[in-house]
């Protein structure tokens, strides 16, 4: 029997909290973050401001150009965390099986509790009412048999909606949606799918998997599965998430790696995975360690302790790449590469954003990618250059190139 998963996503969250605390902002074009002098970026915009094209991650300068009457609000991280915790506690009244995906989003597995309510809809509307009455903010809730469908449903019913898509209704609901609406189909992927004649999610659901595999590798058939209403239904509770002392990944290669391009490509994939797990766990770490095993099993471990904690993959990749070139013997085929980060300290997503103001757009991108992977699987999104490297057509010559690698991201 299929599960019943809810995906709750608060509407214009930071703005909603600001409006709650200052009702004179209600109904106005508001942006959180940035400033009227054009500095900084905005973290979110009210729906009124979004009509002018304002979006999270946009510079305040662009925001003001598009919407000259926009009101910039500085933002209050403590208030957002406070409300987020209150909402989390409310949600826990309806199931123990809850996974907080970000400050304003959670998945709930209500399979074992929903029977005690009149219907799935009844439960959804009760939760929405309770959050509004208690916290003064609205939330959109999508429901489905897995996290992906639930998320698609909450997107479809925004703002302040509830939508249940049981398996029997998914195909009809997805069929005519533009392909860009499918989570995991990014700006880079969309035109490639369009060129294959795929305009809607229904088109992708019916497309031959083998052709998709040729175009996108394993990600192709995975996208098709998502278009057919597939996705993970495993909601991880806080206790199930690992408590980590170090975060690392390693890969062994059946075909030993012989070229620098291949090695750098794998290193990029590994650092991407490590950085993602660090962000999910809310960690930064000062010690980066590289493990390199040559054909014949000779293994080297080489690390460095940095002055400041690292967490962003651009920095981690640069660090790992430097370590690589300090020990790499290019005449020898490589059998295994590992990257790990230790000396961990806790950070929050908000702190990360404040700490690294200069690169905020990259953090926004990284966080968004994390969210997508959390919900819909590792292969749904990645660096386009990682793919190119795998087919041997391009290498990353300079760590700073990393910053301009196009992502397959939905807008
Ligand atoms: P979202 O849920 O993506 O956005 P939202 O709640 O503002 O709007 P929606 O109604 O469409 O859900 O993000 C939640 C909050 O996280 C958002 O209010 C501000 C913050 N945030 C950032 O700090 N940086 C970002 O890049 C994004 C996307 C969000
Ligand atoms: Mg939201």
Image (cartoon, helix red, strand yellow):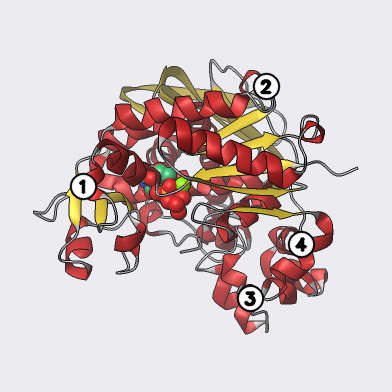
Q: Residues within 10 Å of mark 1 (few under 14, many from 20)?
A: few
- The residue pinned by badge 2 equals 240
Under circle 3, the secondary element is helix
- The residue pinned by badge 3 equals 193
- Distance, label 4 to label 2, CA atoms, is 29 Å
Viewer-side residue, 21 vs 401: 21
Mark nearer the N terminus (3 vs 4):
4
Q: In which quadrant will I find the N terminus?
A: top right
In which quarter of the view is residue 96 placed? Answer: top right
- The residue pinned by badge 1 equals 24
Q: Is mark 1 within 8 Å of ligand 1?
A: no
Q: Residues within 10 Å of mark 3 (few under 14, many from 20)?
A: many
Q: Which mark identifies residue 170?
A: 4
Viewer-side residue, 244 vs 334: 244
In which quarter of the view is residue 322 placed? Answer: top left
- Distance, label 1 to label 4, CA atoms, is 40 Å
Under circle 4, the secondary element is helix
Kindly report which numbered mark, 3 or 4, lies closer to the viewer in this rendering. Answer: 4
């Amino acid at each position: 029997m299929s599960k019943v998963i809810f995906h709750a996503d608060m509407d214009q969250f930071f703005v909603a909290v600001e409006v709650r605390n200052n009702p004179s902002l209600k109904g106005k074009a508001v942006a959180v973050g940035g400033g009227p002098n054009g500095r900084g970026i905005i973290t979110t915009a009210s729906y009124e401001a979004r009509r002018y094209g304002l979006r999270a991650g946009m510079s305040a300068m662009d925001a003001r150009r598009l919407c000259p009457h926009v009101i910039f609000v500085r933002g209050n991280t403590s208030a957002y965390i406070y409300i987020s915790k209150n909402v989390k506690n409310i949600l826990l009244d309806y199931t123990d099986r809850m996974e907080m995906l970000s400050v304003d989003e959670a998945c709930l597995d209500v399979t074992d509790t929903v029977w005690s309510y009149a219907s799935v809809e009844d439960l959804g509307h009760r939760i929405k009412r309770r959050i509004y009455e208690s916290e003064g903010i609205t939330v959109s809730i999508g429901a489905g048999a897995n996290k992906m469908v639930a998320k698609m449903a909450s997107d479809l019913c925004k703002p302040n909606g509830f939508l249940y898509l049981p398996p029997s209704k998914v195909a009809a609901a997805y069929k005519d949606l533009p392909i860009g609406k499918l989570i995991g189909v990014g700006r880079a992927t969309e035109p490639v799918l369009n060129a294959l004649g795929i305009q809607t999610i229904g088109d992708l659901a019916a497309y031959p998997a083998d052709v998709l595999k040729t175009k996108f590798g394993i990600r192709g058939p995975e996208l098709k599965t998502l278009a057919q209403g597939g996705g993970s239904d495993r909601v991880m509770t806080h206790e199930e998430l690992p408590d980590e002392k170090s975060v690392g990944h390693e890969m062994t290669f059946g075909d030993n790696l012989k070229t620098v391009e291949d090695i750098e490509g794998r290193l990029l994939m590994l650092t991407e995975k490590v950085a993602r797990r660090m962000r999910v766990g809310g960690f930064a770490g000062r010690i980066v360690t590289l493990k390199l095993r040559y054909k014949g099993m000779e293994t080297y471990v080489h690390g460095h302790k940095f002055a400041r904690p690292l967490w962003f993959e651009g920095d981690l990749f640069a660090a790992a790449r430097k370590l690589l070139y300090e020990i790499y013997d290019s005449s020898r085929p490589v059998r295994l590469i590992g990257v790990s980060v230790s000396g961990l300290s806790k950070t929050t997503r908000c702190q990360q954003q404040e700490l690294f103001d200069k690169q905020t757009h990259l953090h926004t991108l990284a966080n968004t990618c994390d969210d997508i992977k959390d919900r819909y699987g590792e292969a749904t999104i990645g660096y386009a250059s990682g793919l190119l490297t795998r087919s041997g057509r391009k290498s990353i010559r300079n760590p700073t190139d990393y910053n301009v690698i196009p992502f397959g991201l939905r807008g």
